[in-house]
Image: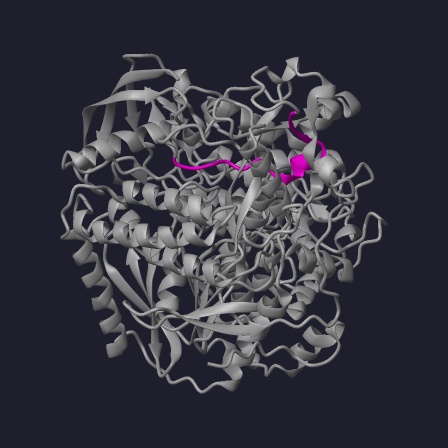
Amino acid sequence: MQLDAKIPSGALEQKWNNHCFELKLVNPANKRKFHIIVVGTGLAGSSASASLAELGYQVSTFCIQDSPRRAHSIAAQGGINAAKNYQNDGDSIFRLFYDTIKGGDFRAREANVYRLAQLSTNIIDHCVAQGIPFAREYGGQLANRSFGGAQVSRTFYARGQTGQQLLLGAYSALSRQIAANKVTFYSRRELLDIVLINGQARGIVVRNLVTGHIESYAADAVVLATGGYVNIFYLSTNAMACNVTATYRAYKRGALFANPCFTQIHPTCIPVHGTYQSKLTLMSESLRNDGRVWVPKNPNDNRTPDQIPEAERDYFLERKYPAFGNLVPRDVASRSAKQMCDQGYGVGSTKLAVYLDFEDAIKRDGKSAIEKKYGNLFQMYEKITGVDPYENPMMIYPAPHYSMGGLWVDYNLMSTIDGLFVLGEANFSDHGANRLGASALMQGLADGYFVIPYTIGGYLASTSIQKLSNEHPCFKDAEKQSSDMINALISINGKRTAFDFHRQLGRILWDACGMAREEKRMETAQHQIAELKDEFYKNLCIPGSPSTFNQSLEKAMRVADFLDFAQLMLEDAITRKESCGCHLNEAYQTPENEPLRDDEHFCHVAAWEYTGENTSPKRHIEPLSFENVKLSQRSYK
Amino acid sequence: MNTINLFLKIWRQPGPNMQGNFEIYEAKDISTEMSFLEMIDVVNEQLTLNGKEPIAFDHDCREGICGMCGAMVNGYAHGQEKGTTLCQLHMRHFSDHDTIVIEPWRARAFPIIKDLVVDRSAFDRIIQSGGYISVNTGGAPDANSILIDQRAVESAMDAAACIGCGACVAACPNASAMLFMSAKVSHLALLPQGRPEAAKRVIAMLNQMNTLGFGNCSNEAECEAACPKSISITHIARMNREFFKASFFSDEK
């Protein structure tokens, strides 16, 4: 298979504009004849649904929760980047593009990232018009703050709830279209399959989570905006419902999966404290604007932080990376924290934590200024830990947070299946091997508001699509396959819960394929996971009936796909014999333990093709070429 | 690490419009570091292994922002801690041998789906009736071309922090959705972008609320006390002012 990213010709700055002109248009009267399915209502899914409906398409939108407003984009805290240069500090579209490419350790496509940077400014304009209450200066202008991997202040924010406010903006736009009958909305539906007819994505199979019914829906094109998969690690910052099922089922139907091993471990999360724990909570990266990260200079120091004098503290990020200090990119900060803990400098009862200290900032700016910037984050920290972060430094440790990998898409955001578009975290396109903070919100909204409305039109206008309904035998076949799979799981009747399998899978994967990776460990993990999968299909216990509201069954189906997908992640990590961004293979490091890329052999996207249940997936390559930036060793010193 | 033993008196109902009842379960060796939902996870694992159906409950982000979780705990929405969602309520606030009574939100507009799970789609329908600014994608002016008083934005943000969990309705003796609705009306009314539709919005949303089976406001202030985001009832007052303005001085009906 030859992967064609369909990157438009011309100068970098002109590619998107030229492409928009060259894409065929669907005339306004014809738009209402096309029916588009959108799965997921996070930033990408809600904004796409609303924008497509505004254009006149018939849209059907599906979400897993009870309301579109609950998608996990809502939990994004810190902010959204835009190259507005409102601060007069030297920002530009090119600089945002450059920071993102460099932050991703040169494993993303230039053309996509440039488009993202260009569209970033439109997003802020649109969101302000929607009434998003972004933070303001006294004069009424928008305020900014800094995020990791950048030396300019370009992050727009609404307290520590930026994701919530942006999502509610997209949700309100979607609600307006639902009220106008342009969008038909289905809640509590989980995607189980994509239906292909003549090689085109023509619909979906879902499970109605309230009634347990298997339902199918037909359309002229399908848009997946189903988010990321780092819940595979069991403990992550993702919401409980986040899963790989939608993208994995699309992969099984022929969509290539790109860079599955690129998973981001976020440096500032509340540390793990017990085996019963169900999730990890993120503390926004924005805290690193004012918080200083440190550990005691002496290993195994058991004194409380207030007893450790200044001279005996090691502000290791400031020491190692003087230019960026506490604002190095996430992968760098996470690895440094892990290294310090591995060497015995960790703090707290588990010794798997470092301090994030606001003492200096509170002295400098006053408690009320800090409260205004981060009040809700401090409150959240106190609720969870019972410790007051105004008085004591926070304790933090890295946790799985985001998947840069995802379904392979071309410049139009179309997967290798015709008519199947993939947006937001579910695709792989913009963040390379490491995503910079405040860029996920930007990408989700760029894809949904400003890219898909153009590119899907180009597809619909230039493709012959036969009229059909979900009475077509392919839909009935797919429905039956999904029912059979559910019945097979229910009838195992074993003695172990899906939660318990998931917990074990997570532990194996975190040790072998987390922040630091090593080939032998990963191969061992492959065997362990294969054994775990065997046991899963012999000893799984799902109480209750499949034809009712059954959360145990939902969980089991997601874990079943995680068990398969874990093998793909490991395979990808083992094959990429270099280190880049978040993928640190211990065999490939610089003397300072930074990731050592191998541009000669691995300057490409690895995209995996499903070849069957018992055969190895096939690896395809999309070479990456850099014409506008120079490939270099990342340095944040 | 401290552990406690508890009794849970919890509402079980197999499906919509079916008979439900309280059942009592023991929750043993519960770490006080656990969240309330993690405690239910532990009980559910036990129930499952004993061949019983686990307790159905809605939850997702488990960090207090998605608004998916919620239940009455000893008669308080999300439990007795101030400004806390159920997922952020921690077991350190309970004592050994406590009996905890857990019920779903009870309101006509929120029918029970199963156990603690209720249908809150009525909230979505309220938003659909006008909780937005009518602006299509594309063509917005530069973001800084609209200057907004910082204080107005901060007040708008106070209201916009609503997570749509439904605690206000569950806590209200009238099962009114006034706090939820006023949070949206107030957020948009405080911003210049929201003014053109302010009259239309408040009338449409109030009309919609009245058709969905929610009660009216009688100034009990229970909603504010229960709100996990501490949204103030002053927003209800602002909504009322918006409503009077709209009724007297606009052509909206």
Residue at left 37%, top 51%? Answer: A525
Magenta region: A278-296
Q: Total number of numbered labels?
A: 0
Q: Looking at the image, which is closer to me, B101 or A248?
A: A248
Q: Looking at the image, which is closer to me, A527 or B45?
A: A527
Across and down, in percent, residue A67 comes to 42, 48
Quadrant showing the C terminus of chain A: top right
Across and down, in percent, residue B38 comes to 35, 31
Residue A266 position (above or below residue A610): above
Q: Is residue B155 left or right of residue A211?
A: right
**Residue B243 appears anywhere in the view:** no
Residue at left 66%, top 47%? Answer: A329
Residue A179 position (above or below residue B68): below
Residue at left 35%, top 39%? Answer: B58
Q: Dividing the picture into quarters, in which one does residue B31 lie?
A: top left
Q: Looking at the image, which is closer to me, A445 or A211?
A: A445
Q: Dividing the picture into quarters, in which one does residue A140 lie?
A: top right
**Residue B119 appears anywhere in the view:** yes
Was residue A292 drawn as part of the magenta stretch in this picture?
yes
Across and down, in percent, residue A621 comes to 52, 73
Across and down, in percent, residue A258 comes to 49, 65
Was residue A136 drawn as part of the magenta stretch in this picture?
no
